[in-house]
Amino acid sequence: MEVLIIKYYLKRFNKKLEELSDWVADVSAHPMFLIIHIAWWSLWVIFKVEPFPYGLLTLIVSLEAIILSCLLLASGNREGEQEKKIARKDLRLSTETNIMVEEIHEIVRDLQEDIRLLQDEE
């Protein structure tokens, strides 16, 4: 029973993480994201929050970049998996359609042959 509960919460956690990574991908793709960051970094330097070489700012920006890149990769990987599923489904449908078309083509050829035979008998 505990294993089922753990699996349930892990699945729920993964779903929330997927939602978060999709949200981060959407927000970070917006130009306002870049504008806010440039303004934040500029204010940090202008108001001299810390002395040069800005160790804390470097740490914050580096951690943000690591987290952002991980979330963006997760979002991109999930989108890639969805595209693969769609491509597999398209291939399967295309193959099935080709088989059906070949069968119909065979039936039409048989019908044409039957019509020729009937015409030759007359």
Image (cartoon, grey):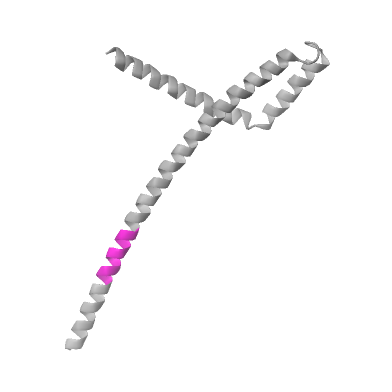
Q: Position of residue 69 (x, y in %)?
A: 59, 27
- Foreground of the two, 102 or 32: 102
Q: Is residue 40 left or right of residue 91?
A: right
Q: Quadrant of residue 101?
A: bottom left
Please report the residue visible at 57 percent of the width from the left and 30 percent of the height from the top.
25
Please report the residue visible at 30 percent of the width from the left and 64 percent of the height from the top.
102
Q: Which residues are magenta?
A: 98-108
Please report the residue visible at 58 percent of the width from the left and 31 percent of the height from the top.
26
Please tell me how many numbered marks the rendered image carries.
0
Query: Is residue 18 depicted above or below 49 in this figure?
Result: below
Residue at the outermost left position:
121
Please report the residue visible at 48 percent of the width from the left and 23 percent of the height from the top.
17
Q: Is residue 77 left or right of residue 47?
A: left
Q: Would residue 17 be counted in the magenta stretch?
A: no
Main SS, magenta region, reads helix
Q: Is residue 75 left or right of residue 52?
A: left
Q: Position of residue 98 (x, y in %)?
A: 34, 60
Query: Is residue 114 depicted above or below 74 in this figure?
Result: below
Q: Position of residue 114 (x, y in %)?
A: 20, 78
**Quadrant in which the C terminus is drawn:** bottom left
Q: Position of residue 1 (x, y in %)?
A: 27, 13
Query: Is residue 26 depicted above or below 45 in this figure?
Result: below
